[in-house]
Amino acid sequence: MTDIGETLLNASAPSDSTISMKWPARATICLAGALALLFPSSASAQAALRAADLRLLAVAEKLQDSNAAMCDRLAPALGAALQSRDQYATDADPGFAADVAFAVLLADGPAARAGIAEGDGLVAVDGVAVRKLPDLAEMPLRDSAFAMLADHPAGQSLQLTVTHAGATRDVSLDPLPQCRALVEVLADGGTEARSDGRVIQIGLGLAQKTSDAQLAVVFAHELAHSVLHHRDRLASENVSKGLGGQFGRDRRLNAEAEIEADRLSVHLLANAGYDPRAAVAFWRSHLGQTIGGGLFRSRIYASPADRAAMLEREIDEYLAGGAPSWPGHLLARR
């Protein structure tokens, strides 16, 4: 579940950081690294994907907002998910008003309250036109737009230039900060979850199988990887994310990161108002055991039973007083 490895799910196949999840953006990942979203052909499939996106956004915003104090990488909380046309197949029309758009909006979020609608295009941030940034040249334009938003100085009004039905207007917002992460559902129907340190992706199949509390458990694990800078840390140690990451030193360091993400996840859940023991219940559930990979799981990940027991110990030792929680023993490893 992060670019550290696939974390929670699909632990049978080593990867970047996941719950054990892979990272095809909305559907497939190009060799050049750019993400391409498959736009569902039927209206029902599109509706199902939008519903999953909206549900994930609601869960994610709750976790990102309530844990902002422990995140040293922040972004404005807009209550919106951005996407760009270059994430879709060339013959697909996502209905966006510009190359980058507000694909999903929470009805009570800052963007929606400011009159921004789903599909509205994001043209400029603080007067600067949305464009590909040099260090994100191989990624979708959406990533650059989000980076421009995240670079906005905290405490100052955010100025967005938005286009709708051919008309362009400026919108001023005063959003609170939240933990920085792009969030989206993968349209491939898989049961994967993953983060590369910037983008957290949940497979549509997984989103549809989980309750809200279970979805929060999955997302909290991926967010924990981002909070703890695991991708950066493993990259600095030249740790392999592929087959080599299953052996020796690399396996040990990958496993340490997964354990830390599991342990931090219950603190993130508690701060967001979720019962942290939902994570224990998840790994003891049929879904958690199935996702855990059984005999074929990657050895980077502990068994579902061991994960549940570890989380139970974490809660008993560090969360007996409830929320808010400041897990300094884990943040010190960042």
Image (cartoon, grey):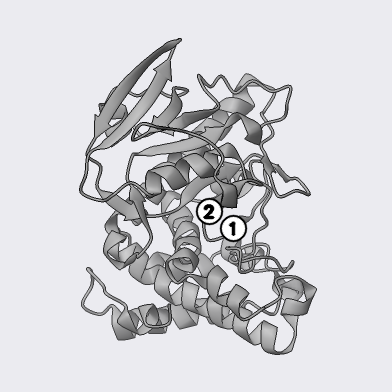
| On screen, residue 202 above or below 160 | below
**Res 56 visible:** no
User: Mark 1: few, some, or many residues within 10 Å (few <14, many ≥20)?
Assistant: many
| On screen, residue 171 above or below 243 | above
**Res 333 visible:** yes
Looking at the rendered image, the quarter that the C terminus falls into is bottom left
Q: Amino acid at mark 2?
A: Ile
Instruction: Residue 48: name its quadrant.
Output: top right
User: Mark 2: few, some, or many residues within 10 Å (few <14, many ≥20)?
Assistant: many
Numbered circle sitting on residue 194:
1
Looking at the rendered image, the quarter that the N terminus falls into is bottom right
Horizontally, residue 179 falls left or right of residue 31, namely left
Residue 288 place in picture, x, y as percent: 57, 64
Instruction: Residue 90: name its quadrant.
Output: top right
Residue at mark 2 to residue at mark 1: CA–CA distance: 6 Å
For the residue labelled by badge 1, is the local secondary structure a helix, a strand or a loop?
Answer: strand
Looking at the picture, tell me which residue is in the foreground, 131 or 302. 131
Horizontally, residue 282 falls left or right of residue 167, namely right
Residue 159 place in picture, x, y as percent: 29, 33
Q: Amino acid at mark 1?
A: Arg
Numbered circle sitting on residue 303:
none
Q: Residue at x 41, y 50 (%)?
A: 60
Horizontally, residue 8 falls left or right of residue 262, namely right
| On screen, residue 307 above or below 115 | below
Looking at the picture, tell me which residue is in the foreground, 110 or 279. 110
Residue 56 place in picture, x, y as percent: 46, 45
The residue lying furthest to the top in this view is 166
List the residue tagged with mark 2: 200
| On screen, residue 24 above or below 233 | above
Residue 82 place in picture, x, y as percent: 48, 36
